[in-house]
Amino acid sequence: LRALPAVALAGHQAATQAIASLLADDVIDVRCDALQALSALALPGDSATLHALHTAFRDAEFSVRCTALGAVGQVAPKGHTESLAAVSACLADRHSLVRRAALKALTTVAEKGDVPTMETVIAMMDNSSSTVRCAAMEALAEIAERGDERAVLVVSWRLDDSHPSVRCTAARVIAKVALEDDQRVQALQGTNLVPQRRTAAEVEARHVELQARYFKAMQDISEQVTRTGSIDWMNSN
């Protein structure tokens, strides 16, 4: 089964039908292997394969759901509405691994700068799972355009997250999404929200220091915008 995509021609009807027949197999690994083989063999945008993947999003076994989500980007064209809706529905899955896989899948299907998908991803930054919150920020970094102010702002809220890994991810994502000359990026450079071999009190003190530097940079930017606006208004009058 795993070797079939290497020897069969892409879109080969008999091969794809044979693989599709295994999607209902009782063995979990067989279903996972069938999904991977089917997506590797399918032609881009193949509706039958996409339907099979979307159906597998509802499989009783979470690993099968994750496999299907990991494969959908190989077949679905960028911006495919049906796939985006099917993947987004998986963000409500009871298993955090599936929610993370769905966020990753959105980055493979959504077009760059897709605002509705970005809003869907932003909503997941409040998820109860810290790993899902991290995955949401990473997904936003992939979908958002460089310099997207809303993306930078919502991720900056996570600099105050209760979980250290989320704070680290937020700092990394801000540096990835914000423009290189953004003062907020400069405030984060050379910092580490979770230093190695430090006590909890030292880590927290470092976090407070970084947070103060970051929001001071935001305040400076706000004041600059306000002054610029005032000067423009005076000149126009």
Image (cartoon, grey):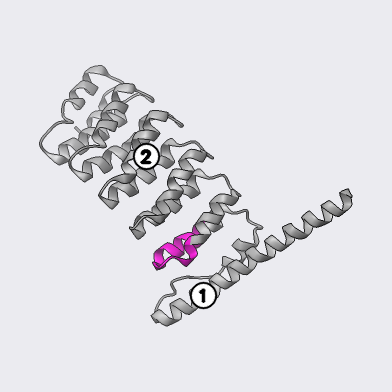
Magenta stretch contains residue 5: no
Q: Amino acid at mark 1?
A: Val
Q: Amino acid at mark 2?
A: Ser
Q: Kindly state the secondary structure of the residue where label 2 is placed.
A: helix
Using a 10 Å C-alpha cutoff, classify the residue at mark 2 as few (fewer than 14 neighbours), some (14 to 19) or many (20 or more). Answer: some
Q: Position of residue 102 (x, y in %)?
A: 34, 43
Location of mark 1 (residue): 208
Image-based side of 196 in relation to 12, left or right? right
Location of mark 2 (residue): 88
The first of marks 2 and 1 along the sequence is 2
Magenta stretch contains residue 166: yes
Task: Answer whether residue 10 is visible to the viewer in this image.
Answer: no
Q: Which residues are magenta?
A: 158-173
Where, by quadrant of the figure, is residue 62 drawn? top left
Q: Position of residue 129 (x, y in %)?
A: 33, 58
How far apart are the alpha carbons under marks 2 and 1?
A: 35 Å
